Image (cartoon, rainbow, N blue to C red):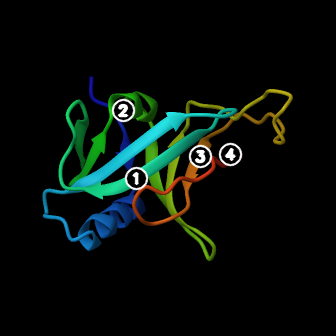
Amino acid sequence: MPAQLAITPAAEKFIRRIVRFSGLPESAGLRLLVSAGGCSGYSSEFSAEAAARPQEETLLVNGVRLFLPPETSALLDGVTIDSVETATQSGLSFINAKQSTCACSSSELAPNPGPARIEISAIGGRRTASPVLVR
């Protein structure tokens, strides 16, 4: 079953720029690899690619082509992809309104149900970022 996700207009613009400046054909898209790791966190990678790999799901959301491995598709189901642009970082943010922040005793954040965000803080291929939880 295909992942059901939403992309904000800011994220659309961000992804389109990555694909456009990659020099790949118009049929190219963004490969997104998200894996679970840490306390309510994820590690993420993305890159512009010419085509999906075997077994990857291809999603077309608002004209943006995403290539998702099966494990990523399952993790992103019900998520909204947004863009983060600040003076110190630029990247994608994944918001899951159904997921609450970590409530375990090892967390530095006080338990506070709310959206969990995963930040990807660099434009470019195959970059990894540490998870950041907010709210």
Q: Which residue is mark 4?
A: 133
Q: Nearer the viewer, mark 2 or mark 1?
A: 1
Residue in the picture at 80% in, 27% down: 104
Residue 84 visible in the displayed image: no
As helix, strand or loop, the secondary structure at mark 4 comes to loop
The crowding category of the residue bearing disc 3, from other C-alpha atoms within 10 Å (few below 14, some 14 to 19, many at least 20), is many
Q: Which amino acid lies under the numbered mark 4 shown in the image of this protein?
A: Leu
SS state under label 1: strand
Residue 53 figure quarter: top left
Q: Are marks 2 and 1 in contact (CB under 8 Å)?
A: no
Instruction: Tell me the amino acid under the disc marked 1.
Output: Phe
Q: Is residue 83 depicted above or below 23 in this figure?
A: above
Q: Which mark is residue 46?
A: 1
Numbered label attached to residue 31: none
Report whether 75 appears left or right of 18: right
- In space, the residues marked 3 and 1 are separated at their CA atoms by 16 Å
Q: CA distance from mark 4 to mark 3?
A: 5 Å
Residue occupied by mark 2 = 73
User: Measured from the top left, where is residue 12 in percent x and y?
Assistant: 34, 60
Name which residue lies at 62% across and 41% down: 116
Q: CA distance from mark 2 to mark 1?
A: 14 Å
